[in-house]
Image (spheres, rainbow, N blue to C red):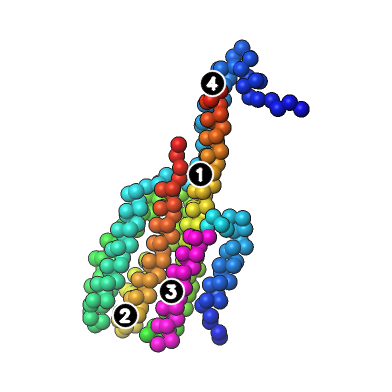
């Protein structure tokens, strides 16, 4: 059986060129999108927020155990939480955002949980130990990393 | 109870490998990176518990947190995989577009 070629079918037709142009427009518009567009500003904000979070724990470690009450770090907690809320807002505004919204929601939930654990120590008459602070730092980093990995992956989308 | 971190992480990696099937090659390096970080984090956590510098409740809460970390990592892997699928699909569409353009 003879292989039929597209130009052999369409070109001889009276409106061949018009049909080909229409086909080109349709195919060109068919580019698929599974993920949101890469955002350099979001990538920078993830890095900046993680840095602030890291600094919070470094500052705690540099503070004498007796002075590690939640109240002494309340302002830093509020600033970081505000940055995380901004990330949640930006992720929600993106298209194809399901995975990014889920990761940011987890980050927010855990940040607040760790903040509340610190806050609750006062009622127990306890202070944060170095080991607890180091662990919070390790675990918070683990919540930021997937977000950064995913955002960096978006920069590898190929747009013609 | 025997708590062998290396064994657990190897089992996690195997489970992910089976679950991703043919896509495993695509996400392997990202998943390996996450597993390596998990190993360092869990070893540090276990060491602190053995030394008694964190209590049992704190230790168990952090183990529970690993579920959320894993969920977050799987979302990231889904995005890495989707980026590659998007690039592959659009490359194929570009070939078709170029072929039609050449005919005009």
Q: Which residue is mark 2?
A: A130
**Label 1, label 2: how far apart the Cα atoms are:** 46 Å
Point out the tag, 4 or 3, that comes first from the N-terminus: 3
Residue A5: name its quadrant. top right
Packing grade of label 3 (10 A; few <14, some 14-19, many >=20) is few
| Residue A76 magenta-highlighted | no
Same subunit under labels 4 and 3?
yes
The chain to which mark 4 is attached is B
Q: Which residue is mark 1?
A: B87
**Label 1, label 4: how far apart the Cα atoms are:** 26 Å
Q: Are marks 4 and 3 in contact (CB under 8 Å)?
A: no
Q: Position of residue A151 (x, y in %)?
A: 41, 52
Quarter placement of the N terminus of chain B: bottom right
Q: Are marks 2 and 3 in contact (CB under 8 Å)?
A: no
The answer to whether residue A140 is left or right of residue B18 is: left
**Label 1, label 3: how far apart the Cα atoms are:** 33 Å
Point out the tag, 1 or 4, that comes first from the N-terminus: 1
Query: Tag 3, which secondary structure?
Result: helix
The chain to which mark 1 is attached is B
Image position of A40 with respect to B99: above or below? below
The image's mark for residue B104 is 4
What residue appears at the point 43 percent right and 60 percent down from the top-left corner? A146
What residue appears at the point 40 percent right and 50 percent down from the top-left corner? A91
Question: Can see residue A105?
Answer: no
Magenta stretch prevailing secondary structure: helix
Judged by depth in the image, the label closer to the viewer, 1 or 2, is: 1
The residue closer to the viewer here, A46 or B39, is B39
**Label 2, label 3: how far apart the Cα atoms are:** 18 Å
Residue bounds of the magenta highlight: B28-52
Judged by depth in the image, the label closer to the viewer, 2 or 4, is: 4
Q: Which residue is mark 3?
A: B40
């Amino acid at each position: 059986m003879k292989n039929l070629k597209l130009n052999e079918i369409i070109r001889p037709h009276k409106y061949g060129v018009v049909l080909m142009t229409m086909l080109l427009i349709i195919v060109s518009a068919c580019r698929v999108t599974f993920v949101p567009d890469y955002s350099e500003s979001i990538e920078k904000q993830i890095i900046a927020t993680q840095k602030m979070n890291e600094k919070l724990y470094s500052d705690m470690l540099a503070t004498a155990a007796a002075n590690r009450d939640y109240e002494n770090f309340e302002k830093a907690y509020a600033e970081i939480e505000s940055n995380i809320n901004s990330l949640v807002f930006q992720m929600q505004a993106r298209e194809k955002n399901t995975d990014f919204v889920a990761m940011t929601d987890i980050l927010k939930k855990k940040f607040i949980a760790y903040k509340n654990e610190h806050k609750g120590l006062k009622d127990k008459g306890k202070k944060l130990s170095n080991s607890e602070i180091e662990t919070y730092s390790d675990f918070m980093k683990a919540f930021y990393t997937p977000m950064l990995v995913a955002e960096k992956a978006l920069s590898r989308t190929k747009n013609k | 109870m025997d708590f062998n971190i290396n064994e657990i992480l190897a089992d996690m990696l195997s489970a992910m490998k089976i679950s991703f099937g043919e896509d495993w090659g695509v996400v392997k390096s990202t998943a390996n990176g996450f597993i390596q970080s998990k190993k360092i984090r869990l070893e540090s956590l276990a060491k602190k518990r053995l030394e008694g510098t964190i209590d049992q409740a704190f230790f168990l809460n952090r183990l529970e947190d690993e579920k959320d970390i894993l969920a977050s990592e799987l979302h990231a892997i889904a995005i890495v995989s989707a980026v590659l699928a998007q690039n592959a699909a659009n490359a194929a569409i570009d070939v078709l577009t170029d072929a039609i353009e050449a005919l005009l």
